[in-house]
Image (cartoon, rainbow, N blue to C red):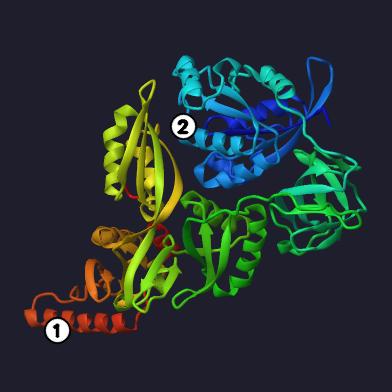
Amino acid sequence: MKNIRNFSIIAHIDHGKSTLSDRLIQTTDIVSKRDFRDQMLDTMELERERGITIKSQTICLPYTAADGNLYWLNLIDTPGHVDFSYEVSRALAACEGALLLVDASQGVEAQTIANLLLAMENGLEIIPVINKIDLPSADIDKVLTQIDDELGLDPDSTILASAKEWKGIEEILEAIVHRLPPPQGDPNAPAKALIFDSNYDPFRGTIVHFRMYDGTIKPGDKIIFMSNRAEYTVEEVGIFQIKRVAQKKITAGRVGYMIAGIKTVSDTRSGDTITLKDRPCHRPMPGFKEPKPVVFSSIYPVDTDEYPDLATALEKLKLNDASLVYEKDTSAALGFGFRCGFLGLLHLEIVQARLEREYDLSLIITAPSVQYEIGLTDGTTMIIENPAHFPDPGSIAYVKEPYIRASVLTPDTYMGQVMQLCLERRGINSNYQYFGSGRMELIFEMPLAEVVYDFYDRLKTVTQGYGSFDYEMLEYRESDIARLDILINGERVDALSQLVHRDKAVYRARQTCERLKEEIPRHMFKIAIQGAIGSKVIARETINAYRKDVTAKCYGGDVTRKRKLLEKQKKGKKRMKMAGEVMIPQNAFLSVLKSKE
């Protein structure tokens, strides 16, 4: 066990985690040059396309150190975006140490600090690494000062590296071997393993990724999941080396996978403990904190016959993405679907893209919302996140919405723009502090609903990409909230309804109507798009009809002949409007979510 190291790479988004993982893989020679490709651990097409890590991936690297001993380094690569911090927390639970990567030109950012705090909560040993030192804009001295002042880590123990240029890779590997502690555990004790991830294989069933703390698991063992007492017989165990490599057994301290013919997808839960049936451990491992979804949106299949396929796809995706929360939902306009909870707007986008690509589904997504607490005049309270469940305004005593404490790290030159953006979003400036080297942290208390709606995109725009953002939940506070309905030809489309602050209702209604006007194609009759609160219309756009020139055959003669033909056409259009249905394309539902600015 003294030759095993379990470690993770944590950093802010785009600080070079995937490139460093690639260099570690190449240095340990587990992939031939012919099979190697960039972003080796980003196996999803979506990850490679966007250049971001979505899923934490595990790989076991054999490394012969300078002392001549062979070490097994279990690397768990993690995402850097704030929406996937739950993936990071699960990865860190399986490790003893972490490499904290900081970009030499960008410096310490919000997610760097958030991930460091997560690692410290788990009691991990931290090795700070400054990456991208080859960049012309790299300022190593400034970043070393930030590591000392803002992170409280020892700048003298920091490794300077450039994963792209192969600089510092050997030093990093030696530091992992000599500065990170080996795992603790007893190979002879009753088996105790923590599930930190899973994925579904159509031929082998659920493949469980686990970290072994005590004991041994081998093929033929009868195992039991402690949360639901489900029993299975192990068919195969092994380690990850790009492909799965079967082993005779997995002993204490190792990270590996297990196949046991698990066809019931819901039996496997991240954070559960595996033990042996005939020699169980006394108590389960402490699992992970349950993720709290902050953005809620409904997903419906375009074709109602695809509802069972959507249900199966969500169950399989939940295995691979434990932070996804969903329940059944129904809509008058869109039929049966699911109300889903996400950790942020990027998470919503990724889940939608994965369902469409991996499971070949066509989906409609409703406008995202947050949870509101509503007090009724009869003294009862209710929690709703779906605008369709918003009660009659006459029966409401008060409405409370969730607030967050947002922390924005930005160069001080952008202070004015960031403050203006936060105040526009109903933010309350609680305080700000200057760090050295022209950087500052602004702390605002603001409604979560304002952050859900394109805040992150706007922050990146006003700070030219240098601003970074992290947040924590506060309490519910009273607000003036109303339901904004979107009417198309006088009919309410419940998938487009939104809960908004009354002061922002007109702006949001106009914006939504304008976007729908761009996306809905012209029909043979005029289409009215209206935004309304109750019976009061507050915004309107009109899509003009296609119109045949019925007067083309009239040459000369009395003007009444032309007027007669135009009146006849007008009556026909009116009849068509009464009977015609407006076709709303899927893009129209999605365009409402996106920021135009």
Alpha carbons under labels 1 and 2: distance apart: 70 Å
Q: Nearer the viewer, residue 451 or 518?
A: 451
**Residue 509 image offset from top left, x and y in percent:** 28, 62
Q: In this view, does 584 lie above or below 82?
A: below
| Residue identified by numbered label 2 | 109
Q: What element carries label 2?
A: loop
**Residue 324 image offset from top left, x and y in percent:** 58, 57
Q: For residue 525, what is the image quadrant?
A: bottom left
Q: Residue 499 carries which label?
A: none
Q: Is mark 1 on a helix, strand or loop?
A: helix
Q: For the residues carrying marks 1 and 2, which lies nearer the camera in this image?
A: 2
Q: Are marks 1 and 2 in contact (CB under 8 Å)?
A: no
Q: Residue 564 carries which label?
A: 1
Q: Nearer the viewer, residue 494 or 426?
A: 426
The 10 Å Cα crowd at callout 2, few under 14, some 14 to 19, many 20 or more, is: many
Q: Which amino acid does label 2 sit on?
A: Glu
Q: Quadrant of the N terminus?
A: top right
Q: Which of marks 1 and 2 is nearer the N terminus?
A: 2
Q: What residue type is labelled 1?
A: Lys
